[in-house]
Amino acid sequence: MEQKRPSYIEQIPRVDWEKTPASVQELVEGMGQEIESLKKQLAEVLIVQQQLEERVNRTSKNSSSPPSADPPGFGNKQEKKKSTKKRGGQPGHSGTSRDLYPIEECSCVIDHRPEECANCGEILNGSDTNPYRHQIVEIPPISPIVIEHRLHQLTCNLCGGTTRGTLPDEVNPSGYGVRVVALVALLSGVYRNSQRMVQSAMLEVFGISISLGTINKLRLEASDAVAGCVDEAKLYIQCSHVVGADETSFNQGNIDGSNPQQRKAWLWVAVTPLVTFFEIALTRCTAAAQNLLGENFCGILNSDRHGAYNWIDLERRQLCWAHLRREFIKMSERPGVSAQLGTALVKQQEKLFELWHRVRDGTLSRCDFVELVQEIRSSIKTTLVEADEYQITTREKTPLAKTVRTCRQLLKVESAMWLFVTTAGVEPTNNAAERAIRPAVIWRRTSFGSQTLAGSNFVARMLTVVTTLKSQRRNVLEFMTQAVIAARDGKLAPSLLPEVISSDESEDFLNVA
């Protein structure tokens, strides 16, 4: 049986090839094999090049990288023409001024009356019923209030034994008052200062000298003081109707032996309009998500496509369109068919958000919005199906293969992309959770995480307290002070829950509690 000639010599007529000397045939065959080998190597190199280019071109627009990681000059708009106006407020603008303190809060009021007329010099008498008010705000010299308790030791005349006096039950043995503890927690939790910076601030500003070990003890006392109200906030989250969730990596050491395998920790966040809850776990799997939201969570979840949330039914999920847009942009920046598919998806996403912004502005009704979105949804699904029809191998790494895999994954969860269209109170993006987690990311970068489980608990609890109180416009220092007072008295800490809860939410919360 005649052997089939190699593909690289098929173009040579059979007669000519048979007349070719054997040595030449061998040489041609060797060169052909080398060419085929070089073609394969070139294809592999091109794939690696495309992967590297995609990695180099990775920005906050086409990935989950933060804007701080963008290259210099990225996203800069075109320079505007230099304005001929002067800097500052322009003529005719409304203007603003600082708020004045009520007269009742002023430490001192000094009246200034003119003695004579500025025009003619006549002596002036009387008072102005509405004088111009100018206030000087000053901070008095700060000095700590030090109360010394002397424990006398007396000797018994009968047996010669000595007995020392004891502190009353209401005197805390730590040596520091509740406001000191609250202030240390405030400097650490709100302003994200390191323990050395807290130590320096307490000495420079308040004249209080504290060792680093004591600062750590005061932080832990503050953490324990708010533990109960933080658990209450977690229960409130698990009973909420709509919750946004997200997670980011976190570093936790093993000084206390709580992380012997040196596993990466993850900071989880669950967000509602008035209550936010943080938790640090040594896993990013489904178990951590169930612990965060509750295994019996029956609300609506707004999140990205992380697999840890897949235990929640698609009918109760809203995928973040900000993440979807990044995926579409990433596709559009790839060569060939991927660019066509990605560009089509980006255009439909932009149409969708133009309509959504009109809904938020009140210029488009919800009913009209639902009808207009049907065409956009159909177009996006058609594009995803078109990408799904391309045949790729399991381990293929070409740009088209990546695009096809992403589109196939999106097709599986396509129904979870549109819940916000028909359900009021559901946002199309998970920006609330990402904004809530941003201070935690900054804290992580400046402190390199925590070294113990107790340190991680302090971070999660303080983030919960601070973020929740800010959303409710409550004073953090006052809350922490009351929490420490309650803890030292053996009472319950003040609640983080909003004062006004709707009847439905209140009923659900009480049923679970």
Image (tube, rainbow, N blue to C red):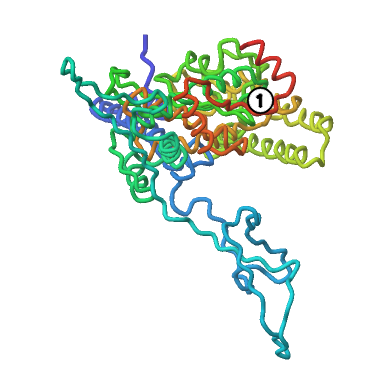
Q: Is residue 387 left or right of residue 278?
A: right
Image side of residue 149 versus residue 179, left or right = left
- Picture layout, residue 83 above or below residue 350: below
Which residue is at 44% across, 52% downward? 72
Residue at disc 1, secondary structure = helix
Residue 50 in view, yes or no: no
Reply above or below: 341 against 107.
above
Q: Quadrant of the C terminus?
A: top right
User: Residue 102 appears in which quarter of the rendering?
Assistant: bottom right
| Residue most extreme to the bottom | 120
Pinpoint residue 55: horizontal percent, then vertical percent: 42, 38
Does the rendering let one see residue 209?
A: yes
At which x and y percent is residue 422?
76, 25
Question: Viewed as shown, does residue 358 lie left or right of 143?
Answer: right
The residue drawn where x is 38% and y is 25% is 168
> Which residue occupies 60% across, 10% down?
296
Looking at the rendering, which quadrant does residue 506 occupy?
Answer: top right
- Picture mark count: 1
Q: Amino acid at mark 1?
A: Met
Disc 1 crowd rating (10 Å Cα; few below 14, some 14-19, many 20+) is some
Q: Depth check: 15 or 377 in front?
A: 377
Locate the N terminus and report the quarter of the image it occupies.
top left
Residue 325: x and y in percent read 60, 35
Q: Give the residue at the far left of this rendering.
A: 160
Against 162, residue 202 (above or below) is below
Q: Image point 66% across, 31% down: which residue?
A: 428
Front-most of 109 and 468?
109
**In the rendering, at what x and y percent does residue 390 appear?**
57, 23
Mark 1 = which residue? 417
Q: Using the image, determine if residue 272 lies above or below residue 478.
A: above
